[in-house]
Amino acid sequence: MIPLKYNVRNLRVRWVTTLMTVIGTGLVVWASVLSFGLTDGLEHALRITGHDLDLIVLRKGSTDETSSGIEQKTASEIAALDGIARDANGQPLCSVEFVTNLTKPRRGDGGTTNLIIRGLEPVGRSLRPDFKIVQGRDVRPGLNEVITSERMAQRFQNLAIGEKLEINQVNFEVVGYFESAGSAAESEVWSDTRDLTNARRTPGAVSSVNLRARDADARDALIKRITDDKQFQLSVIRETAYFEEQMSASLAIKVIGYVIAAFLTFGAMFAAANTMYAAVASRSREIGTLRALGFPQSSILMSFLLESVLLCLMGGLLGCLATLPFNGLSTGTANWATFSEVTFSFRFGPNVLAQGVLMALIMGMLGGIFPAVRAVRLNIIKALREQ
Amino acid sequence: MGDAVRSGEKVVSVQNVFKEFRRDQNSIPVLRGINVELDACEYLALMGPSGSGKTTLLNLIAGLDRPTSGNVIVCGQNLGQTSEGDLARWRSRHIGFIFQLYNLIPVLTAYENVELPLTLTPLNRRERDEHVKAALQVVGLADRMDHYPRQLSGGQEQRVSIARAIATDPTLIVADEPTGDLDAKSASEILDLMQRLNTEFEKTIVMVTHDPAAAARARRTLHLEKGVLVNDVSSAR
């Protein structure tokens, strides 16, 4: 093997071209990892929302909560079914909820988008992952109050603590921010069910029943019981499946992200190849010397391939590092299942960063292979005569 | 590492060698029926005008090229019938190269340049270190081992190149115009050093040169003209 320091020092000696290639590769990896982080953040938001034992009961034919309607009497009967898990106080983990969509203005760009307002009882908080109030306080029933997440407050007008959100000409005061492990719940505004249905002039309306089964057997039994009951006319969806279906937005971003990443990688590959062709051309005599000394063709191939990979890996690592300031940064996109906005944070976990490094590796390998083959094919005697 | 050879053993046997180069559709003969034998510990100078075929003959003996016909047997190996990979391995074991333009790797220090061919041997790091230091000691550059080629004079660079050529203790040293790029003083020092390698360390050397003064240091001189051997002179030195 030709010592690695030969490649490292050559990259250092040609620092201008090295730097240019590293920056080019770094930009490509940066842009791609940003898009991967975006998709990962969105998928995480939707995936973490789903609990394996949780069920969502909707009106038969409805695919989401905003278009569903259940009679209050039926909702009460469901809450009384056997097999529902109970909290420490023996209360069933079953939340009767009302969900509505309102078009509200975003901050900054002045555009409007749909906002999900959910009315729920305190037990509903236990069904969301790691729910906690992080600023202000929770709503008090009868006072027309709402809570939301801090990132929703940043994205929508009138959602900061102390501001008033108008719902059907009734002002709801924002009294607190909550967090729920970055789940889809953080894309919503929550109020008391009665206050919300009154403001919407649909008192007693129920959109869905969210519940947690005691165990997997109880979950399957509950699904069968509710689905088979002709009087209920309801459908039951496992929460994990419900949010899985809502990932269509993420899929579109993912496909676009990967297509763009592939094109960018292709471009960066040419940049790497160009740099390596120049390296081979300027080092022909060195290559001839190494061959004369007895280094086999495989060593020359590996050496130049390694140099190309090293070059792109530097860019890749730089690109990955440059995405870290965006980690946790909030953004939002349309959820095409509910026609509302889902907010989420960029996530640059090990998997996303590994994809960036892998991209750099591919760029280095593909960009380096042809110049390396050219180096191997150089005629020793001609190469030794090069100046 | 090179296999030890005793004085008088046959190291090189060039038998009725023809070499042609092709340019477009034309065939250009460079060597025409060359026969040369070289014993161990000989010091041979190849002389002749430009285009006479002396460097081509040197390249054939060094295993960098193959004859169009005839046999080139060096250190017991018929080079015309050896694969590319085996030739590379063979060169690393048997041949030490000295080039006109030194051909040191600019990003490696003198020490690392000398160590380079040793990385192809089974020697461990400590053994390599001993070989490198011994070789640099022989050429008188032990105190410059950490210098890069650009920090050395032409003569010093060529001495590092010689240290690299002898570090693996090869059977045969081939030198292509080793003094062609040096001033008279440095050239004389290099020729002294090569002579010492031959007399003191009993190295077999084949050197291509234009310079009669350089050729005079060799024990034997072959003259080529238009690809034909025209004179074979042994000195009484």
Image (spheres, coloured by chain):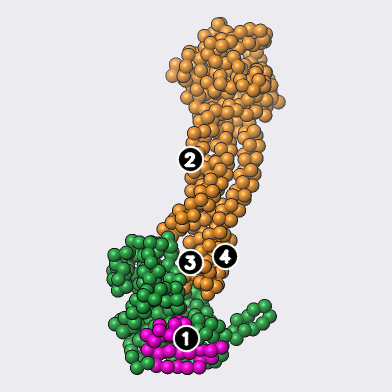
Chain colours: A orange, B green
Q: Nearer the viewer, residue A335 or A12?
A: A12
Disc 1 secondary structure class: strand
**Circle number at residue B47:** 1
The amino acid type of the residue labelled 4 equals Arg
- Viewer-nearest of discs 2 and 3: 3
From the viewer's perspective, tell me whether residue B218 is left or right of residue A378.
Answer: left
**Circle number at residue A286:** 3
Image coordinates for residue A193, horizontal then vertical, percent: 59, 12
Please determine if labels 4 and 1 lie on a single subunit: no
Please determine if labels 3 and 1 lie on a single subunit: no
From the viewer's perspective, tell me whether residue B211 is left or right of residue A358.
Answer: left
- In this view, B155 is above or below A151: below
Separation of marks 2 and 4 at Cα, in angstroms: 33 Å
Disc 4 secondary structure class: helix
Name the image quarter holding residue A147: top right
**Circle number at residue B94:** none
**Circle number at residue A321:** 2
